[in-house]
Image (cartoon, rainbow, N blue to C red):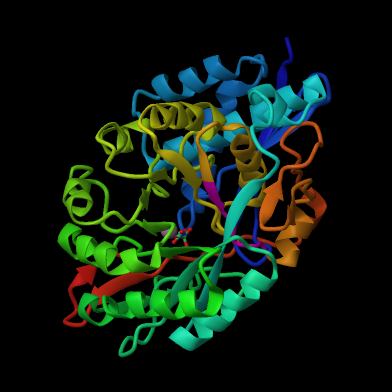
């Protein structure tokens, strides 16, 4: 028995907000888990502090599965991003503790390394096609084997994925939601042009990706996928909102461009049909938003049966704690595809000292016992919480649209 003696939530804003759960045990071993839900941080913090943590004190930290089931079934109100981020934080912290107790890096407990490193993709973006290509060239020079391309759309003031600060994209940039304007008609022809220019500048060895960010109808997505086929994209992400999983049938009928979806999914039920009908190629569920290592492992196992690979979300709002845990998962998972990697700022890296490192286009989780990420609480306390919201999106006539 390794008793949970204390558990608390730490909120810090070293450039952007992070919610971190720290669990302490009778043996003096502690573990941490990421609980950050971008723009809704305090809801998860309250869920943990007010409802979950009081039930954890005195429990055996070694009973990861039992605690997961207790928090999932015991809430009665199952699923949802707030609940599942809270469960993920507990689960991640408990895996951290178990691996530290064993004196092993977490990937060893999962089954050991299946590969030498975790291929990641970086984000090249710019206001214009030319700017984006120049950024992509820079990423290629840094050693990236895979690069996501996002570019501004002529005639639109702003769009998803184009940042002010090139390396460190963060869309939650204002106290209240910024309002963007969207036009599918203006956007659709720009992406094939971007990919054509990218292949010319970067060649054919590098993998190229694009995120539609839920802005197309299935038939529009089928058209875009078809137009991109000559440039062999690695994937087209979030082509259409996925509440309606069957919608992907229509996209599938029209294109061989590989499809990725799932960064906002929180359970296996969100992707069951997508996987079983082989409507997607990559599942983007991640540790912090899909119930932790324990649940993500189930999603990946289901996906493996149907030839679907993993491609976990790794934006800057997934804290280094999530990234560390995800990299152990990625190093082990048999049906690994790719891992998204948006770099954190130096301030964030200082608050979360970590064992993972980037080399030659891959990340490696390192050999430190646990998931290899910790939190410097004294430093974290110098960056107080600052409310921030994700943007909203309207069509040119004012109709509220998907962001
Ligand atoms: O918009 O993480 O692929 N990455 C993404 C991200 C998401 C943010 C939302 O918090 O789509 O940029
Ligand atoms: Co995305």
Relative to 41, does residue 172 appear above or below in the rendering? Answer: below
Q: Residue at x 38, y 77 (%)?
A: 159
Of the 4 image quadrants, the one containing the N terminus is: top right
| Between 49 and 317, the one nearer to me in the picture | 317
Of the 4 image quadrants, the one containing the C terminus is: bottom left
| Between 255 and 168, the one nearer to me in the picture | 255
Q: Is residue 378 visible?
A: yes
Instruction: Reply yes or no: does residue 284 show up in magenta.
Output: no
| Between 165 and 136, the one nearer to me in the picture | 136
Relative to 369, does residue 193 appear above or below in the rendering? Answer: below
Instruction: Point out the stretch of residues depicted in magenta.
Output: 338-344
Instruction: Give residue 228's position: percent from left, percent from top.
Output: 32, 67
Relative to 248, does residue 237 appear above or below in the rendering? Answer: below
Instruction: Give residue 328's position: percent from left, percent from top.
Output: 66, 37
Instruction: Give residue 67's position: percent from left, percent from top.
Output: 54, 19
Instruction: Reply yes or no: does residue 341 show up in magenta.
Output: yes
Q: Residue at x 21, y 66 (%)?
A: 223
109 relative position to 330: left or right: right
| Between 49 and 231, the one nearer to me in the picture | 231
Q: Residue at x 43, y 42 (%)?
A: 82
Q: Ligand 2 falls in which quarter?
A: bottom left
């Amino acid at each position: 028995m390794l008793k949970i003696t204390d558990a608390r939530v730490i909120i810090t804003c070293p450039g952007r907000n992070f919610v971190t759960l720290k669990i302490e045990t009778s043996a003096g071993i502690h573990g941490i888990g990421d609980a950050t839900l971008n723009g809704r941080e305090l809801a998860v913090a309250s869920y943990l502090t007010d409802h979950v943590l009081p039930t954890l004190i005195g429990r055996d930290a070694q009973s990861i599965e039992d605690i997961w089931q207790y928090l999932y079934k015991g809430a009665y109100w199952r699923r949802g991003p707030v609940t599942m981020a809270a469960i993920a934080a507990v689960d991640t912290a408990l895996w951290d503790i178990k691996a530290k107790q064993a004196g092993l890096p977490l990937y060893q407990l999962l089954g050991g390394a299946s590969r030498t490193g975790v291929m990641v993709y970086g984000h090249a973006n710019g206001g214009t096609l030319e700017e984006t290509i120049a950024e992509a060239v820079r990423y290629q020079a840094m050693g990236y084997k895979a690069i996501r391309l996002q570019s501004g759309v002529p005639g639109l003031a702003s769009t998803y994925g184009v940042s002010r600060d090139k390396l460190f994209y963060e869309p939650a940039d204002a106290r209240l939601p910024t309002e963007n304007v969207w036009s599918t008609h203006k956007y659709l022809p720009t992406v094939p042009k971007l990919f054509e220019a990218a292949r010319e500048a970067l060649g054919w060895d590098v993998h190229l990706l694009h995120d539609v960010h839920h802005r197309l109808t299935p038939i529009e997505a089928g058209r875009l996928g078809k137009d991109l086929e000559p440039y062999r994209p690695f994937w087209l992400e979030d082509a259409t909102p996925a509440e309606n999983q069957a919608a992907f049938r229509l996209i599938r009928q029209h294109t061989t461009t590989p499809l990725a979806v799932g960064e906002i999914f929180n359970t296996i039920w969100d992707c069951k049909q997508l996987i079983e009908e082989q409507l997607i190629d990559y599942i983007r569920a991640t540790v912090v938003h899909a119930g932790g290592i324990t649940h993500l492992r189930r999603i990946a196992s289901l996906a493996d049966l149907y030839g679907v690979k993993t491609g976990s979300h790794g934006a800057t709002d997934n804290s280094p704690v999530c990234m560390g845990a995800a990299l152990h998962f990625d190093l082990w998972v048999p049906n690994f595809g790719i891992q998204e990697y948006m770099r954190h700022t130096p301030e964030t890296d200082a608050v979360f000292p970590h064992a993972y490192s980037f080399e030659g286009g891959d990340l490696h989780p390192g050999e430190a016992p646990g998931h290899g990420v910790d939190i410097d609480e004294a430093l974290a306390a110098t960056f107080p919480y600052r409310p921030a919201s994700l943007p909203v999106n309207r069509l040119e006539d004012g109709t509220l649209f998907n962001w």
